[in-house]
Image: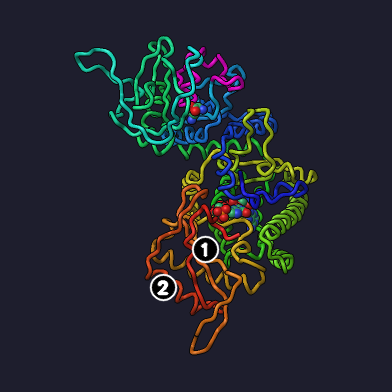
Amino acid sequence: MPRQNFCPLDSHAPDFFLIFLRPLHFSLLLLQSNFFISPLILWTFHSITMATDGSDPIPPHKTFDTILVLDFGSQYSHLITRRLRELNIYSEMLPCTQKLADLDWTPKGIILSGGPYSVYWDDAPHVDQAVFEIGVPILGICYGLQEIAWNFGKNVLAGEKREYGHAALKIERHGDGETGGHVDKLFAEIEDDTEVWMSHGDKLSHLPEDFITIATTKNAPFAGMAHKSKKYYGIQFHPEVTHTPKGKIVLKNFAVDICQARTDWTMGKFVDQEIERIRKLVGDKGQVIGAVSGGVDSTVAAKLMKEAIGDRFHAVLVDNGVLRQDEAKQVKETLTAGLGINLTVIDASKRFLDGLKGVTEPEKKRKFIGNTFIEVFQETAKQIAAEAHGSSAAGEIEWLLQGTLYPDVIESISFKGPSATIKTHHNVGGLPKDMNLKLIEPLRELFKDEVRELGKNLGIPEDLVWRHPFPGPGIAIRILGEVTPEQVRIAREADVIFIEEIKAAGLYRQISQAFAALLPVKAVGVMGDKRVHEQMIALRAVETTDFMTADWFPFDGAFLKKVSRRIVNEVDGVCRVVYDITSKPPGTIEME
Ligand SMILES: Nc1ncnc2c1ncn2[C@@H]1O[C@H](COP(=O)(O)OP(=O)(O)OP(=O)(O)O)[C@@H](O)[C@H]1O
Ligand SMILES: O=c1[nH]c(=O)c2[nH+]cn([C@@H]3O[C@H](COP(=O)(O)O)[C@@H](O)[C@H]3O)c2[nH]1
Ligand SMILES: NC(=O)CC[C@H](N)C(=O)O
Ligand SMILES: [Mg+2]
């Protein structure tokens, strides 16, 4: 379950608060639990599209050959769509309960994902029978394989042993014994003993009728099966995870060779399509407002918006007094001059710092900052709306832009499918009704690295695209104890030196996130022959891919020595520097 401090809401706090206080890993933690990952993501977005302008922009599944992933709630379902995109194949994920008759398009192929259930349970989810009737190829992965087997023969039961981890895949050959037989199309280019990753407890007791075994492992005699005449396939292993190094080839064999899907989806097309969609959605006069931090997600979303509707997009950066050194100024320059984005910077630093006086409890800091952010954002939005209203060329501000990414929305969807409620922190249902804004989230199908690629595509400078994430509550959660202007100064100055040195050493991209934190303790030192009694800086630098788990970065001693010397010499109020060598877990990346 998520840690409490990421869900610091009591039921009265506005939901928008959590957007601001939205840590990527919060979602990813939930991703680890067996939630049905899903689909409403796309569903919601399209439904907004339809509802507003009446003229239906052509959705990507009608333009590109699309592989439909039916999600049974595996932790990895989203990775299937992701891998297909890497192969330039468009893919959409919908709940396993999706009725095909309700779709107004036909997929090129269907993938049934893994899932936490056992197909033989009374309440286990099952696919619409039409899946087996529309005549497109089907690939079942893990639960998906078991679902196909169950459908054709009720032949799945609990195995004696659960199987988690690596296995060596043995490819079965069929046909002419003299020529050595042939490997099934699904495993073209896959060699014997290739490493695959398993995560299951159930197994097939025997093959369903008309199926043949196309691969085995030591523990799974039916690690791969195929229908004799129809294009139905099942694999017990997970091709979508990186632990199956050749998994992408299996997915390619299925999508390209078996389904004959064209590989013409690109990030560039995503941009064109999204711009077109935003234009239709917002109309000729509609205006959009968005909170933009200068972080990767909101900047990429803002740039897309700017391309789509120009100055009818109003970006707002709230200077909460706990941004990094000169950040508001730099973001203003980059976004306005560099990217042509219409950015209003609101200097609310006094309001934030006044309110933070005397607050030492981490949760209180987070709540105060989140709530104040909403207040400031709302006030600014009203002001911009009033100005926009006065101008004859412009219409009302109807829309709110959010840089929500795929991992942020994953847990928003309940395992019960489309009737599910979207969790509050991923929509703005909690924004006061009088704001009356509808949501645009152009990045909600993408992962962080895809957003970076998109950013490059949109001409956003490399250094911004590769920026380390910076949390909404900013330096306030890196100053342990009370946040005062003086403490902010010390933390900022130390942070500048640390990051400068990391960049100079060419390590910035290797490190996922780095910062200097300020500890609320004093130590004795000797500087210029004088006794000093001053504070301590804790350096933190981590490597991680998902921000859920992280390891501290192994700097060499000379590097740390240099940073320590510079900080103690250049930052007034600091006489010691320590390096945090706690991984996550048990630590977290931020200090509070
Ligand atoms: N100071 C700020 N002013 C305006 N909006 C902000 C500010 N800080 C955060 N936000 C909003 O909160 C959202 C969540 O912040 P988050 O840090 O997760 O994303 P980001 O800043 O866009 O990207 P990154 O993860 O690279 O920092 C942002 O996308 C932005 O909409
Ligand atoms: O926008 C955000 N608002 C927040 O309140 C918040 N708290 C943590 N983070 C970011 O989430 C990632 C994991 O952080 P932790 O290991 O400290 O939980 C790291 O990247 C953190 O910077 C936040 N981002
Ligand atoms: N990863 C999966 O799809 C698991 C499927 C099923 N729950 C099993 O244990 O076999
Ligand atoms: Mg940020």
Tell me the magenta residue range.
120-149
Asked if 441 appears above or below 235 in the picture, the reply is: below
Amino acid of disc 2: Lys
* Residue 123 on the magenta span: yes
- In the rendering, at what x and y percent does residue 331 appear? 57, 60
Binning the other alpha carbons within 10 Å of mark 2 as few (below 14), some (14 to 19) or many (20 upward) gives: few
Q: Is residue 181 left or right of residue 336?
A: left
Amino acid of disc 1: Phe
Asked if 472 appears above or below 431 in the picture, the reply is: below
Distance Cα–Cα, label 1 vs label 2: 16 Å
Q: What residue does disc 1 label?
A: 515
SS state under label 1: strand
Identify the residue at image location x=28%, y=28%. 192
Regarding residue 141, the answer to whether it shows in the image is yes
Q: Residue furthest left?
A: 178
Q: What residue does disc 2 label?
A: 561
- Give 52 or 433, whichever is nearer the viewer: 433
